[in-house]
Amino acid sequence: MDTEEFFLPRSQAANERLHAMIPGGAHTYAKGDDQYPENLAPVISHGRGAHVWDIDGNRYIEYGSGLRSVSLGHAHPRVTEAVRREIERGSNFVRPSVVEVEAAERFLATVPTAEMVKFAKNGSDATTAAVRLARAATGRPRVALCADHPFFSTDDWFIGTTPMSAGIPAATTDLTVAFPYGDLAATEELLTRYQGEVACLILEPATHTEPPPGYLAGLRELADRHGCVLIFDEMITGFRWSEAGAQGLYGVVPDLSTFGKALGNGFAVSALAGRRELMELGGLRHSGDRVFLLSTTHGAETHSLAAAMAVQTTYAEEGVTARLHALGERLAAGVRDAAASMGVGDHIVVRGRASNLVFATLDENRRPSQQYRTLFLRRLLEGGVLAPSFVVSSALDDADIDHTVDAVAQACAVYRKALDAGDPTPWLGGRPVKPVFRRLA
């Protein structure tokens, strides 16, 4: 068996300090040290481009940067310069800044399928605002969400449907129902069963699989026929699918959509966008009941909006979405070849759109395995690759991809040994990684 030589003593000590003060040891569960092999959860010192350094002095090629938010690479010069300019002019005022006008105009020019936009700081607030708006507009109580998509919001209407539902009243959860992705018949049956009760259909328009032909258009027709609001969660698909998100790529216009993540290249900004008729219910220029849509002290910080405008300019002028796809295609091909050459091509499986790649780690019976994921992550870390996914940033270059593929090949060699032994335990170095959504800690 291989001898373990990779240690992160400073990161390990920092993780203990984090857990002593911060529940879960991180401010996002997906960043928790339980998502990494035992004692191998690096604590980051800094990042530049596609690379990050931990406090132990190790450099990594990083994937899934900032949970998919840093799509241009860390400390991107156009973004940081735009932010620096605004910070020196003040970041928050008692009245709207002219930057809010400019950012809204720029966003609506980038996403022309929307007529109005409101900015916030995180995706959960934007999606919950969309749900509230749909309920107000329709007068209906139920939310129908796509069961095949992993996350929509930290708020009760969604979290109550997960294994981490402690603290959420059943009466709240009972108002959320689910439909399967890609199945129009099942969705129509749901809408018929709860006829006149469903306020909205909310889903990611695409994730790890392309939408079946006609699916999104079919949802649009179902929503219209049943009088409910169609909401696209474009937190991930925004910019990675096209500058205007999946709605821009597939040509299906939702009533409301939410953007975030790549919009700020790591700076905190999200957006709720959609039809004027709906969005204005949260405004002042109508005669109906007022909707408390989004009202946040920091929602329009000037530097975050400046970051968003710089991101949109960079995407448009530098063809970033096309570059993300080209990098992802090169990476996916390399990983698949490396896995196949080591005899594990049926066990390490790369999935998703090239700009948003994830991987599955399958056991001897080709079932998803947290133990084999642990083995794989450990070997990648030892090879200088930090990869909870294979989601690329445009800062990667061919040398980074080649290095990653080499690290994958070395990990696959160990993976093959574990498969042959019928037990990955000797190669884990401790407890296996854990899924984020689980009932017990």
Image: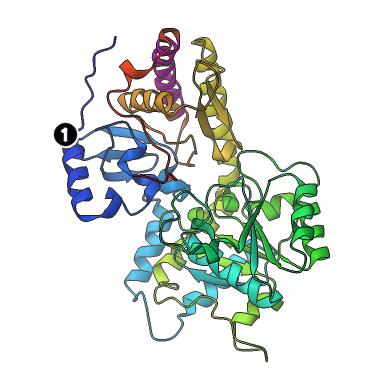
Picture residue at 16% right of the left edge, 38% below the top: 10
| Residue at 51 percent of width and 75 percent of height | 294
Residue 94 as seen in the image, left or right of residue 345: left
Residue 152 picture quarter = bottom right
What percent of the width, then of the height, locates residue 275?
70, 72
Judge whether residue 409 is colored magenta.
Answer: yes
Question: Can residue 319 be seen?
Answer: no
Q: Dot 1: what SS?
A: helix
Residue lying furthest bottom: 287
Name the one closer to the observer, 39 or 354. 39
Place of residue 101 in the rendered image (x, y in percent of width and height, measured from the top left):
54, 77
Q: Residue at x 20, y 27 (%)?
A: 7
Image quarter in which the C terminus is found: top left
* Residue 91 placement (x, y as % from top left): 36, 74
Residue 92 within the magenta-colored segment of the rendering: no
The residue lying toward the viewer, choosing from 334 and 419, is: 419
Task: Say if 333 sits above or below 185 in the image.
Answer: above
Q: Which residues are magenta?
A: 401-419
User: Quarter-wise, where is residue 313 in the image?
Assistant: bottom right
Residue occupying image coordinates x 49% and y 54%: 261
The amino acid at mark 1 is Pro
Residue 419, above or below 430: above
Does residue 29 appear in this view?
yes
- Left or right of 223 in this view: 332: left
Quadrant including the N terminus: top left
Between 108 and 205, the residue placed more toward the observer is 205
Say left or right for 68 vs 146: left
Q: Which residue is mark 1?
A: 9
